[in-house]
Image: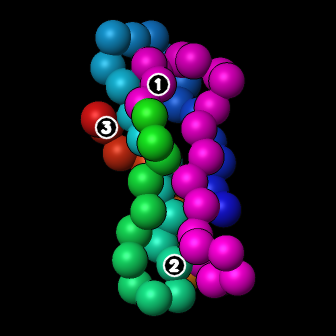
Amino acid sequence: MATGWCDGTGPQKYQVGVKCANGTWYWSAGAKAFGDRTGLSAYCPTGMASTAHTMRRY
């Protein structure tokens, strides 16, 4: 699982991503505006470990 939020002010948006043991990146279902501290989460399939995480502009 990866969680996070980006400082700043919208209207630009971001997503959270997690790279799983199968080599696939999974991205948060939605996008939030910079500065929205409610945050986002991205998850690996059940039972699979994560190997990295990141954020990107959406």
Frontmost of labels 3 and 1 is 1
Report the amino acid beneath label 1: Lys
Secondary element at tag 3:
strand
Type of amino acid under label 2:
Cys
Q: Which amino acid does the dot numbered 3 rest on?
A: Arg
Residue at 39% in and 11% down: 10
Q: Mark 1 = which residue?
A: 32
From the viewer's perspective, is 25 left or right of 49? left
Q: For the residues carrying marks 3 and 2, which lies nearer the camera in this image? A: 2
Residue 48 x, y percent position in the rendering? 63, 83
Say whether disc 3 or disc 1 marks the residue closer to the N-terminus: 1
Location of residue 5 with respect to 53 vertically, above or below: above
Kindly identify which residue carries mark 3: 57
Tags 1 and 2 touching, CB below 8 Å: no
- Here the colouring is rainbow
Magenta residues, dominant SS class: loop
**Image quadrant occupied by the N terminus:** bottom right
**Within the magenta stretch, is there residue 48?**
yes
Q: Secondary structure at mark 2?
A: strand
The segment highlighted magenta reads 31-50
Residue at 61% over, 46% down:
41
Q: CA distance from mark 3 to mark 2?
A: 20 Å
Q: Are marks 3 and 2 in contact (CB under 8 Å)?
A: no
In the image, 43 versus 2, the foreground residue is: 43
What mark, if any, has residue 6 been given in the picture? Answer: none
Residue 8 percent across, percent down from the top left: 48, 18
